[in-house]
Image (cartoon, rainbow, N blue to C red):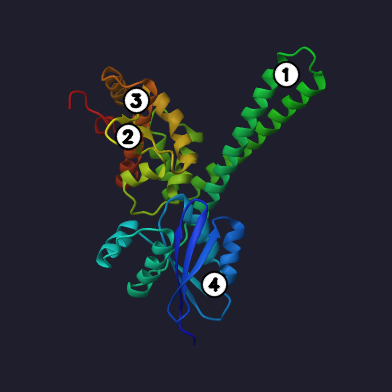
Amino acid sequence: MKKHWLCGIDVSAKELAVAIDTGRGPVWEGVFSNDGAGHRKLIRRLTRSRARVRVCVEATGIYHLDLCLAVVGADRVEVAVVNPRATKAFAVAQMQRSKTDRIDALLLLEFVRRMEFEAWVPPKDSILALRALSRRIQALLVTRAQEKNRLHADEAVDATPVAIRESIERHIEAINAEIESLTEAALEEVRGDATLSARFDHLVSVKGIANASAVTLLAELSVLPADMSARQWVAHAGLDPKHAESGSSVKGAVRISKVGNRHLRAALFLPALVASQYEPQVKAFYQHLLAAGKKPMQALVAVMRKLLHAIHGMFRLGADFDGARFYREGA
């Protein structure tokens, strides 16, 4: 039997930096696009021989998942998804000072060569189905909003033919029916899985998280590695602060990075807005931030961030929302 090929892949939003060792030493393979076409091209390269292949990637939240699902389904290919903290410690041990996509791919190749290989287990079918349903619902919601905007604009113009308005109205009705049908299918997936069902019930215990928001939050969070911390969830959602400084004189306003899962970030907005009005401790926290001089949007983003921390704790403890844990006035 041939020796394992080894592969290290540094994953970013748009590209995959790939290094391969076929048994003759590490080789920089190049860059592949991080999309379906790029995944297929990479798989063809990895399965060129009859050798088994061990692939190592870092857990990067949203960016590595589709790649791993594609690669792990290929014949004779195994994938290890490693915690970035482990690879960072490994880089320090290797006295690696530089950091580029190529260097990171070669580092992951060396990591899979030296460390014990633990094959990645894909999320359950129910979780993947829930994520796909949720993503489709979100896409339809965007389309519906666009159609409603068109209808509003057309109604303001007397010259717009009635047939166009009726066409838009029929389209909106059809979209509503699709959203309702897909939401029912998503809820069936949730109720058919004990873990998803329990977590769903914990989510809707927050005043502000209704069924639609709970489905999206559950779908996006359930595919994340189990050992991710609450702070890593925040970074994954793109809600971590981004500082803008230049030299000693230019200091811009601190903004959120928005480098992360836009679906998760969007799903937190409305629950945070509603909870800031109707969930007592969340409202108290929000008002405290306003009194401290924060602008309403800054305070709302802080609520989103803190709410994500709370959800992390709810999932970890298997408990409903506890306002006293969220915020204590005067604490």
**Which of the two labelled residues, at mark 2 and mark 3, occupies the earlier sequence position?**
3
Q: Position of residue 156 (x, y in %)?
A: 71, 13
Q: Counting other residues with Cα less than 10 Å from the Cα at mark 2, is it few (<14), some (14-19), or many (20 or more)?
A: many
Give SS at disc 1.
helix
Which mark is first along the chain, 1 or 3? 1
Quarter of the image with the C terminus in it: top left
Residue at disc 2, secondary structure: helix
Structural crowding at the residue carrying mark 1, measured as other residues with C-alpha within 10 Å and reported as few (<14), some (14–19) or many (≥20) = some
Alpha carbons under labels 1 and 2: distance apart:
41 Å
Residue 172 point in image, percent of width and height: 69, 28
Seen at 61% across and 41% down, the residue is 182
- SS class of the residue under badge 3? helix
Indicate which label's residue lies in the foreground, 4 or 3.
4
- Can you tell which mark lies on residue 154? 1
Q: In the rendered view, tell whether residue 99 sits above or below residue 314.
A: below
Q: What is the x, y in percent for residue 312? A: 33, 43
- The reply, left or right, for residue 190 in relation to residue 48 is left
Mark number for residue 255?
none
Name the kind of residue labelled 1 in the image.
Asp
Front: mark 1 or 2: 1
Residue at the extreme bottom: 1
Task: Report which quarter residue 308 is drawn in.
Answer: top left
Which residue is depicted at the point 40% across and 45% down? 236
For discs 2 and 3, the disc positioned in front in the rendered view: 3
Circle 4 sits on which residue? Answer: 46
**Label 3 sits on what residue type?**
Ala
Residue 299's mark?
A: 3
Q: CA distance from mark 3 to mark 1?
A: 36 Å
Which sits earlier in the primary sequence, circle 1 or circle 4?
A: 4
Mark number displayed over residue 306: 2
Using residue 303 as the reference point, say whether residue 178 is left or right of it: right
Corner quadrant of residue 244 = top left
